[in-house]
Amino acid sequence: MAKVMIVGANGQLGHELQRLLNEQEIAFDALTEKELDITDLDAVKAKIAELQPAVLYDCAAYTAVDKAEDEGKALNWLVNVDGTKNLAQVAAEQGVKLVYVSTDYIFDGTNKGEYLEDDPANPKNEYGRAKWAGEEAVRHSGADYYIVRTSWVFGEFGHNFVFTMQNLAKTHDKLTVVNDQLGRPTWTRTLAEFMAHLVKTEAASGTYQLSNDNTATWYDFAKEILKNTDVEVAPVTSEQFPQKAYRPQHSVMNLDKAKATGYHILTWQEALSEFLESLG
């Protein structure tokens, strides 16, 4: 019986984690939301009791940030808070180590420096509020846990900024991209590797922040994605590209604690290059 369990197996991080564990020849049970509804406490109890994992990777999340402001508000809370509470409660009851993925959106983006793990949270959109409540549920559950905050995620197995830019470049000679939001892009491979690294090295329980190194605006990121094309990328302000949900202007998270575990973090430029090369 596998000692590792993944929920949210059909998301971009869930897919990436499965690929990594297969490469490492680590047995796992991977469940989609159809196979386990994490918002059903009884179902969670029964499935974890059946599979008896030592480690539970929670890759399940509602991530439609703009929809979470209105039409998806209830579902956002149901999955990201109630579902997380269920997993954390059962992990505590059954002695399972829980790895929960959170977000830079728990911060308000007004800090001009780098956010530390214990800096005050002040989420300004519904998604961020739900993910912070999920973090708090994990912390207060009594479970042995890792919370891993990340940002600007891209990878092979889902909708993300890299694919959006590449697709738009097929039909546009010029693209305008926001240049006043600063953060750190994160390759799903880097994130999956770090999550597995924490477990393998038995790092101290607690909250970590993990993105690829160096900072970028979305404009910087887009320029790098399309640098080998003839498409012009022009900077615009957030006011020129309004979105329903608030986006932090400056959500650079400090990576020192993650680096202190011995995990080598690629720069986002290196990660993007490796990712694009892997696509062929």
Image: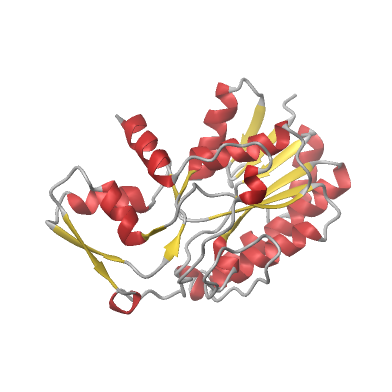
Is residue 101 rendered to the left or right of residue 280?
right
Residue located at (51% from left, 59% from top): 63
Q: Point out residue 7 in the picture as x, y percentages from the top left corner.
A: 63, 43
Is residue 130 rendered to the left or right of residue 267?
right
Residue 36 visible, this orientation: no
Asked if 175 appears above or below 59 in the picture, the reply is below
Residue located at (74% from left, 47% from top): 44
Q: How many marks?
A: 0
Asked if 211 appears above or below 103 in the picture, the reply is above
Front residue of 134/247: it is 247
Q: Quadrant of the N terminus?
A: top right
Asked if 69 appears above or below 193 in the picture, the reply is below
Front residue of 39/233: it is 233
Q: Quadrant of the C terminus?
A: top left
As drawn, which residue projects farthest toward the bottom?
A: 239
Q: Point out residue 37 in the picture as x, y percentages from the top left corner.
A: 65, 50
To which quarter of the image does residue 174 belong?
bottom left
Asked if 20 appears above or below 214 in the picture, the reply is above
Residue 162 visible, this orientation: yes
Q: Point out residue 200 in the picture as x, y percentages from the top left corner.
A: 71, 31
What scheme was used to colour the molecule?
A: secondary structure
Residue located at (44% from left, 56% from top): 215
Residue located at (42% from left, 40% from top): 271
Q: Point out residue 161 in the picture as x, y percentages from the top left corner.
A: 36, 53
